C-alpha cells in the first residue's frame, strides 16, 4: 500500500466533494468528507474494479447505503476515471448524470441506487447471497452512517447476512456521531455498535477513518473467511479536512457559499502542502 499516493488521492476527492456541493448549492458535504478516505482506499487499492469495464462480471461491488453522501462516491468514481470530472459541476442539475442520490441506471460505476436509509445494506446482502449461490469470487462492500443504523431494516439485513454465512460481505459503519438533528447518542443512541453487530453474528473490527495504516489493517482482517460477514466500525470526523465544517451537525446537508468555498479550498490546499513536505 502506497500511503502517500492514497493521501494525495483522498485530498483530490475532498476538493471535488466541496466543489461539487458548492456548484450545486445543495448537498451533503459533512458525511461525504468523513467517508472520503475509506472510499479512496477501496477504489484505489482494495476493490477489483475497472473504469473501462464498469459492468465487469467478476468485479467487486460497492453499495453506498448512506446514499445522501453521493458527492463522496461520485468524486472517487471521477478520480478513478469512470467519468469526466466535469460532471461533478453538474451535481443535482436537472437532466445531469449525477443526481442527489446514486443512480445505477445513469452513472457508470454505481452498483446500486440508494438513498432511503437502511435499504442499501439490504441490497448488499442480496448481492452477496447471489454471489454465494453462483460461487462468484467477488466481495460486496457497503457503507452505512451511524445514524442510519437506527433503522430497523439494518438489523433485519444484519441478521440475514449472518444466517446465510455471507463472508463475502464487508460493511463499514461511518461513526462520526452526528446526524442531521444532532449527536447520534442524543437523538437515538446506537451504542455499543461493536457489541450489537457481534451479537448478530458478525466479525467486527475497528479503525481510525482518517489513518490509512489503520484502514488498511482493518480491511486486511476482512480477508479471513470464516462463514461470518465482516463489519468495520470506523471512528471518523464529520467534515474532515475543512476546518469550519469539522464535528458540526449543521454541515450535514448545507452547501458552502462563495466565501466558505474559498476558505474550504484554502484549508485543503494547506493539507496538500503538508503532504508535499513529508
Image (tube, grey):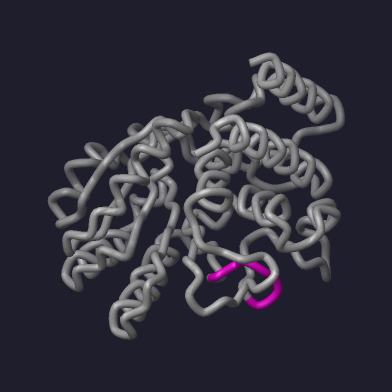
Horizontal side of 212 relative to 109 (left or right) equals: left
Q: Which residue is drawn at 76% across and 34% down?
A: 256
Which of the two residues, 254 or 54, is positioned nearer the viewer here? Answer: 54
Residue 228, given in percent of the width and then of the height, sits at 19, 60
The answer to which quarter of the image holds residue 246 is: top right
**Residue that extends furthest to the bottom in the rendered view of this protein:** 134
Q: Is residue 213 visible?
A: yes
Of residues 82 and 231, which is closer to you in this image? 82
Residue shown at 35% from the left, 77% from the top: 131
Q: Residue at x 66, y 56 (%)?
A: 77
Please identify the quarter of the rendering in which residue 52 is found.
bottom right
> Could you say which is closer to the camera, residue 6 or residue 245?
6
Q: What segment is highlighted magenta in the picture?
A: 105-111
Q: Where is residue 222 in the image (x, y as percent from the top left)?
A: 30, 51
Residue 217 rendering spot, x and y as whole percentages: 35, 37
Q: Quadrant of the C terminus?
A: top right
- Rendering coords of residue 176 (x, y %): 44, 34
| Mark count | 0
Q: Can residue 183 be seen in this view?
A: no
Q: Does the magenta stretch include residue 109?
A: yes
Q: Who's the residue at 73% across and 58% down the image?
A: 81
Q: Is the magenta stretch mostly helix, strand or loop?
A: loop
Is residue 214 inside the magenta stretch?
A: no
Q: Residue furthest front?
A: 1
Left/right placement of residue 139 relative to residue 5 reads left
Amino acid at each position: 500500500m502506497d500511503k502517500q499516493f492514497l493521501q494525495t488521492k483522498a485530498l483530490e476527492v475532498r476538493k471535488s466533494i466541496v466543489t461539487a456541493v458548492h456548484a450545486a448549492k445543495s448537498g451533503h458535504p459533512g458525511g461525504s468528507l468523513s467517508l472520503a478516505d475509506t472510499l479512496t482506499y477501496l477504489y484505489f487499492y482494495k476493490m477489483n474494479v475497472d473504469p473501462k469495464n464498469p459492468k465487469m462480471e467478476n468485479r467487486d461491488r460497492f453499495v453506498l447505503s448512506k446514499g445522501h453522501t453521493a458527492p463522496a462516491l461520485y468524486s472517487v468514481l471521477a478520480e478513478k476515471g469512470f467519468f469526466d470530472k466535469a460532471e461533478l459541476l453538474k451535481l443535482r442539475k436537472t437532466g445531469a448524470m449525477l443526481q442527489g442520490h446514486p443512480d445505477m441506471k445513469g452513472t457508470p460505476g454505481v452498483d446500486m441506487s440508494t438513498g432511503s436509509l437502511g435499504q442499501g445494506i439490504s441490497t448488499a446482502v442480496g448481492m452477496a447471497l447471489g454471489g454465494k449461490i453462483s460461487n462468484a469470487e467477488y466481495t460486496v462492500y457497503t457503507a452505512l452512517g451511524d445514524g442510519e443504523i437506527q433503522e430497523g431494516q439494518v438489523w433485519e439485513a444484519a441478521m440475514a447476512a449472518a444466517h446465510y454465512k455471507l463472508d463475502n460481505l464487508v460493511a463499514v459503519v461511518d461513526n462520526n456521531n452526528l446526524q442531521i438533528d444532532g449527536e447520534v447518542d442524543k437523538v437515538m443512541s446506537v451504542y455499543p455498535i461493536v457489541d450489537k453487530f457481534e451479537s448478530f453474528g458478525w466479525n467486527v473490527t475497528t479503525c481510525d477513518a482518517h489513518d490509512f495504516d489503520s484502514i488498511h489493517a482493518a480491511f486486511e482482517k476482512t480477508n479471513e473467511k470464516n462463514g461470518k460477514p465482516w463489519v468495520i466500525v470506523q471512528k471518523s470526523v464529520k467534515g474532515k479536512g475543512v476546518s469550519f465544517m469539522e464535528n458540526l451537525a449543521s454541515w450535514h446537508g448545507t452547501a458552502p457559499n462563495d466565501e466558505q468555498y474559498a476558505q474550504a479550498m484554502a484549508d485543503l490546499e494547506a493539507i496538500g502542502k503538508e503532504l508535499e513536505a513529508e
